[in-house]
Image (tube, helix red, strand yellow):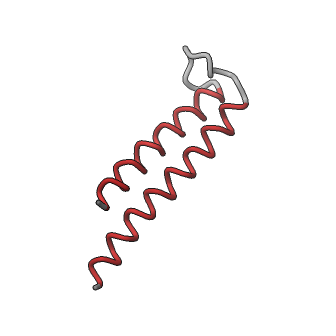
Amino acid sequence: MRIVFVVFGVLVLLAGTVFALQGAGYIPGSFMSNNPPWIWIGSITAIVGLGILAFGTRSSRAAKLT
């Protein structure tokens, strides 16, 4: 089950990073390009993904200790 959190966290982190970069205009070709609200949406999404990833890796280490 922990691997699910790690994989999902990485996917959410990558999606958030792409959203933020598109909002900033670094990745063109989307309705999100050069659209500042997507910088915030992407940043928040990336932080949530990082939290999920941290939870998945933390619970992995905690399980090894028991």
Residue 12 percent coordinates (x, y): 46, 43
For residue 36, above or below residue 29:
below
Residue 19 percent coordinates (x, y): 57, 32
In which quadrant of the rendered image does the C terminus lie? bottom left
Foreground of the two, 29 or 11: 11
Relative horizontal placement of residue 65, taking residue 11 as reference (left or right): left
Residue 14 percent coordinates (x, y): 46, 40
Relative horizontal placement of residue 61, taking residue 13 as reference (left or right): left
> How many marks on residues?
0
In which quadrant of the rendered image does the N terminus lie? bottom left
Tell me the residue at 43%/57% (across/down): 53
User: In this view, which residue lies farthest toward the bottom?
Assistant: 66
User: In this view, which residue lies farthest toward the right?
Assistant: 36
The part of the image, by quadrant, that contains residue 55 is: bottom left
User: In this view, which residue lies farthest toward the front?
Assistant: 1
Tell me the residue at 62%/43% (across/down): 43
Tell me the residue at 48%/37% (across/down): 15
For residue 24, above or below residue 6:
above
For residue 3, above or below residue 44:
below
For residue 55, above or below residue 48:
below
Residue 27 percent coordinates (x, y): 55, 23
